[in-house]
Image: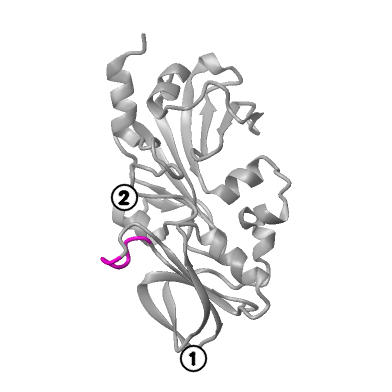
Amino acid sequence: MVNKVLVAAISAALICAQCLAQSKYNNQLQPGLNTRDDAVRVFGQPLRALNTTQSEYPPPRGAERLVIEYRNGSGVIERIEAYFIKPYSRAAMIQSLKLPEQPEATRKNAAGNLVEYFGDSALLVLTYASSDASSGVKSLGYYSRGLFDRALDKKQSSSETKSNPASRRGFGPEEDNSTFQGAITLRYFGTNDIEYCALACAANPQCNAYTFVKPGAYESNPNNGVCYLSSSFEKKVSDPCCISAVKGEK
């Protein structure tokens, strides 16, 4: 029987994976959706920048390090990786996260450690202390859909290219806390995935910019995001509600 105290410690430290949609870190941050500003709101200012896309933040209880990776040229979170003070047993992690026994895929990282990938709505990655699962889970990663698929080198059909950054070529950087003034809207639709927003604009020759309204940005729509596709706009303006990008901008 798995130690209940151990499971509680894991849960308290980091985990809220039992969600209807993609797993969220502590039910607050969803990679692929939330941004650098959201990370600061939850964790405070980063302790240090590791490189141009990764920063280390104050770790939660039960972890020795917390690293967040951001999308290149954007403030959107791609990965949240928590490194435990000591490895947890696989059984404890599987039970606490309510994951299936069989992962979608297994790999070895550059150091030779075993890595298990759990897809579907979880998008969670367990990295072990050695090449063997008996060594225990050393870190837990929350991935965006795009990063998860790239890690597994998935070949995507046209309906799946929303997860592939190549489908976003021709866009400038996603700018957090920005929207467009005087925009001519082609269409809008509800989604909690900014990747759908980018894909829809990329596939529409009349679309020259998109705006993603974050879930909870407005009290009237607290749980859902909205994507606006625009043919033109007058200028960019600052607004914490949204993330925006322009086709062809560098």
Q: Could you tell me if the residues under marks 2 and 1 are in contact, i.e. CB atoms within 8 Å? A: no
The residue at the point 56 percent across, 70 percent down is 173
Q: Which residues, given as a range, are shown in magenta?
A: 215-220
State which quadrant residue 119 falls in: top right
What secondary structure characterizes most of the magenta part? Answer: loop
- How far is disc 2 from disc 1 in space, using C-alphas? 36 Å
| Quadrant in the picture for the N terminus | top left
Query: At 30% from the left edge and 68% from the top edge, which residue is drawn?
Result: 218
Q: Amino acid at mark 2?
A: Phe
Task: Please state which amino acid type lies under the numbered disc 1.
Answer: Glu
User: In the image, is residue 24 above or below residue 113?
Assistant: below
Secondary structure beneath label 1: loop
Magenta includes 34? no
On the image, the x and y values in percent for residue 16 come to 36, 37
Q: Going by the image, does 183 lie left or right of 208?
A: left
Q: Residue at x 43, y 66 (%)?
A: 226
* Residue located beneath label 1 in the image: 234
* Residue 41, visible in the rendered structure: yes
Which is more toward the observer, 71 or 49? 71
Q: Is residue 141 above or below residue 78?
A: above
Circle 2: element type: helix
Query: Of the numbered discs in the image, which one, if any, rests on residue 43?
Result: 2
Quadrant in the picture for the C terminus? bottom right
Give coordinates of residue 7: x percent, y percent: 33, 22
